[in-house]
Image (tube, rainbow, N blue to C red):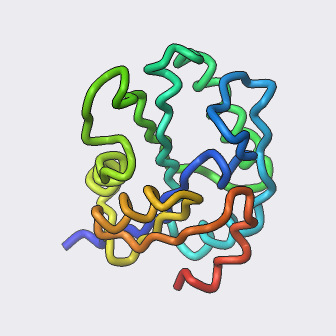
């Protein structure tokens, strides 16, 4: 039987980049947080690193897929320079006031379930680090252990919660 992978899912805003209090709409406002060593440690322990983020600003028309793509490309490049590779990026482009209900907007587990299926991940050996209660809820619904941090809190401060 194929061995299952383990993963650390990561919210984006307030976890990987500076929390702006609202949507990060412009690339100029996208400031990467230094969680390089912490994520390298997790990667070296065999965890896949997968980003799962609500991006309702897309549905609101506040920024484009192109602008979002630039932010994610920059995030990948900055972390790559520190030896950290993100396995994938999942984002929910919906907003309930604009696009109705969907299965991917956290606290629903859709983004995580997609990653779990695609990368053969064992949820019981995986985690979701986020700065909102909805991140923990999404993790719990997907069978993943949620870890709640404060916005912009260094991930290194919660490494002891991950086996």
Residue 86 or residue 96, whichever sits in front: 96
Residue 26 vs 49, above or below: the answer is above
User: Where is the N terminus found, in terms of image quarters?
Assistant: bottom left
| Residue for point 55% across, 52% down | 11
| Residue for point 52% across, 49% down | 51
Residue 23 vs 135, above or below: the answer is above
Outermost left residue: 1
| Residue for point 27% across, 27% down | 100
Residue 80 visible in this rendered orientation of the protein: no
Residue 3 vs 114, above or below: the answer is below
Horizontal placement of 129 versus 105: left or right?
right
Residue 7 quadrant: bottom left
Circle count: 0
Question: Measured from the top left, where is residue 136 in percent x and y?
Answer: 44, 65
Question: Measured from the top left, where is residue 8 in percent x and y?
Answer: 50, 64
Residue 96 quadrant: top left
Question: Measured from the top left, where is residue 31 in percent x and y?
Answer: 79, 39
Residue 124 quadrant: bottom left
Residue 23 vs 41, above or below: the answer is above
Residue 133 visible in this rendered orientation of the protein: yes
Horizontal placement of 7 versus 103: left or right?
right
Horizontal placement of 121 versus 6: left or right?
left
Question: Measured from the top left, where is residue 76 in percent x and y?
Answer: 66, 41
Outermost front residue: 97
| Residue for point 52% across, 71% down | 147
């Amino acid at each position: 039987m194929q061995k299952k992978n383990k993963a650390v899912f990561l919210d984006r805003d307030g976890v990987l980049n500076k929390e702006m209090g609202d949507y990060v709409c412009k690339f100029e406002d996208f400031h990467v947080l230094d969680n390089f060593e912490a994520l390298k440690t997790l990667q070296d322990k065999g965890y896949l690193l997968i980003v799962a983020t609500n991006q309702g600003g897309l549905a609101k028309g506040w920024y484009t897929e192109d602008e979002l793509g630039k932010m994610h490309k920059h995030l990948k490049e900055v972390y790559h320079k520190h030896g950290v590779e993100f396995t994938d990026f999942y984002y929910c482009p919906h907003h309930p006031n604009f696009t109705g209900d969907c299965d991917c907007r956290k606290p629903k587990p859709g983004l995580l379930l997609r990653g779990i299926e695609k990368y053969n991940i064992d949820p019981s050996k995986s985690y979701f680090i986020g700065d909102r209660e909805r991140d923990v809820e999404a993790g719990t619904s997907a069978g993943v252990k949620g870890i709640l941090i404060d916005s912009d809190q260094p991930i290194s401060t919660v490494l002891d919660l991950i086996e």
